[in-house]
Amino acid sequence: MALDNNETDAREKRSIETASGTTSPDNAKSGNGAYLIAAVVVVVCLTLGACASGCMRLVGLAFHEELGSNGSAPYEDDVYFDEYPDGYENYEDYDYGPWGWEDEVVDEQGPQGGESEMVEVKDVMGAELSATRDTIDSLLYASDYANAEGTVRTTIREMVLIDRDASTELANLLHGVAWNDKDQGEALEKAATLAKETEESLRAVALPAIEGNNAAEVSGGLERGKSAAIARWQAIAAQIELFQKADEVSYGEVAKTDDAVAQASLNAANEFKDALQHSANR
């Protein structure tokens, strides 16, 4: 069948659209405009990214300058702490004894150039020695007494308070010398008497008779704890005697007596904890 002119023109003008192309005559008019628009968008995005990066860098530099070159806060007139103060570059080269940091470098023979290094007794008496710091009471907590048998708890508290009160009095004597409030010889004489009296007070504490379940464990803990508490004050007496010998004492001797006091305190606390725990499980 023959087509008229209008039908022929309609077919010629109809476009075919596919995923890969088009027959539309308008496509030829698009030119490179789409590519130019895409290129402009890319350039704009890159420019914005570069600006943002530059701003962040400026902020970082300003922050870094404010804090200091090592990242620490500024300290008076732009002075920064870049190093350990006064030669403490390596803390492992220094000893930390019961009296605090010492200036002597550790050598191959031992701390402070050797255990024979001397220190004034007055300075040692102002330190936190185990005799005044690590009391038995400080090593026991309320939870250790929880649910414990009444007689066991009362007996242990009696010994613990004897030790605590005597330690407080001892601290006043020793620190009074270090602060120039007390005469050294007189204070040490009183400290020696205090140590002897405290030992006698602890020996006088009567231990309760324990019967029933865990009786051996409870009784043993009480007896060993009492012995350790007495040993603590014997070690304290030895330390005081050391201080009475001369105005100076070696680091090694102080460390030895201090360790003995600390160990006796720990032993007493552990034995009392054991007795309390076993009495709670009876």
Image: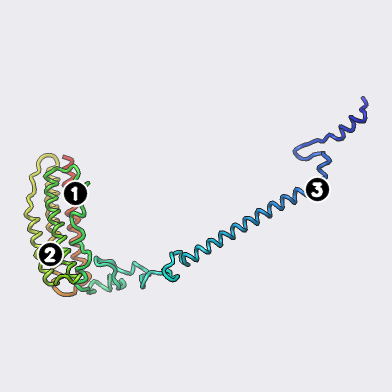
Q: Residue 202 appears in which quarter of the rendering? A: bottom left
* Residue at image mark 2: 237
The reply to whether discs 1 and 3 touch (Cβ–Cβ < 8 Å) is: no
Q: Which of marks 3 and 2 is nearer the N terminus?
A: 3
Q: Residue 97 appears in which quarter of the rendering? A: bottom left
Q: Is 25 positioned to the left or the right of 54 in the image?
A: right
Kindly tell me whether residue 107 is visible in this rendering: no
Q: Which amino acid does label 2 sit on?
A: Ala
Dot 2 falls on a residue whose secondary structure is helix
Residue at the image point whose x is 9% and y is 43% from the top: 210
* Residue at image mark 3: 31
State the separation of the CA atoms marked 3 and 2: 105 Å
Q: Earlier in the sequence, mark 2 or mark 1?
A: 2
x then y, percent, for residue 40: 71, 53
The reply to whether discs 3 and 2 touch (Cβ–Cβ < 8 Å) is: no
Quadrant assignment for the C terminus: top left
x then y, percent, for residue 23: 82, 39
Q: Which amino acid does label 1 sit on?
A: Lys
Q: Which of 237 and 86 is in front in this view?
A: 86
State the separation of the CA atoms marked 2 and 1: 25 Å
Residue at the image point whose x is 24% and y is 67% from the top: 99
Q: Please give the label number shown on residue 273.
A: 1
Q: Residues within 10 Å of mark 1 (few under 14, many from 20)?
A: many
Q: What residue type is labelled 3?
A: Gly
Q: Residues within 10 Å of mark 3 (few under 14, many from 20)?
A: few
Up/down of 135 relative to 124, above or below: above
